Image (cartoon, helix red, strand yellow):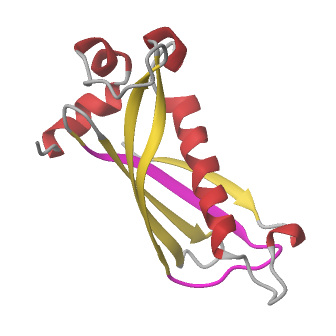
Amino acid sequence: MSFTSTIKVRGYHEDRFGHVNNARYLEFLEEGRWDYLDERGPQGGFTALGVFPVVAHLSVTYRRPTSAGDRLTITTHVASVNSRKIVMHQTIHQEASEKPCCEAEITVVLVDAASGKPVVLSKDILEAWPDLVSANGNSSE
């Protein structure tokens, strides 16, 4: 299930060429993921599960520039799940034109808070985070 958040591009997001620098898109994507997790992440939060999320891989495709004043829509959803990783897909669109600015695929692993080691996605984790169960039909081992 997709979740959408918005952000307004500010002047300090621009580089000397007058558009948003590629590194800022990573921040926008992260903001969108945290918005998603606040609303659709594990019930009770990661702390209650004794784990925390870590980005293991990130692939970004940039489509078009954005500038100060643009409102961006960030759409986030869980694309697939297997026993050890969660793959999320995100897109950023210019709100006014609905044109895509960037797309990203993010691989997340959950790490045990005590040991710092990756964990298998247990029944408790899956039950606490319903979107993982929904996406499990798209999973691959």
Q: Is residue 28 above or below residue 55?
A: below
Residue 127 sits in which quadrant?
Answer: top left
* Number of on-image labels: 0
Please give left or right for residue 2 compared with residue 87 in the image: right
Q: Residue at x 25, y 24 (%)?
A: 120
Residue placed at 75% from the left, 83% from the top?
19
Q: Which residues are magenta?
A: 63-80
* Residue 45: image location, x then y, percent: 52, 18
Q: x, y (%) of residue 14?
A: 81, 76
Residue positioned most to the right: 11
Quadrant the C terminus occupies: top left
- Determine if the magenta segment contains residue 28: no
**Vertically, is 38 above or below 123?**
below
Give the left or right position of residue 7, taking residue 136 as reference.
right
The residue drawn where x is 38% and y is 25% is: 117
Q: Looking at the figure, which quarter contains the N terminus? A: top left
Q: Is residue 138 above or below residue 22?
A: above
Image: 22 above or below 53:
below
Left or right: where 126 falls relative to 29: left
To which quarter of the image does residue 130 belong?
top left
Q: Residue furthest bottom?
A: 17
Q: Dividing the picture into quarters, in which one does residue 33 lie?
A: top right
Please tell me which residue is depicted at 19% across the width and 31% down the height of the picture.
83
Q: In this view of the protein, which residue sits in the foreground, 97 or 60?
A: 60
Measured from the top left, where is residue 38 in percent x and y?
58, 30
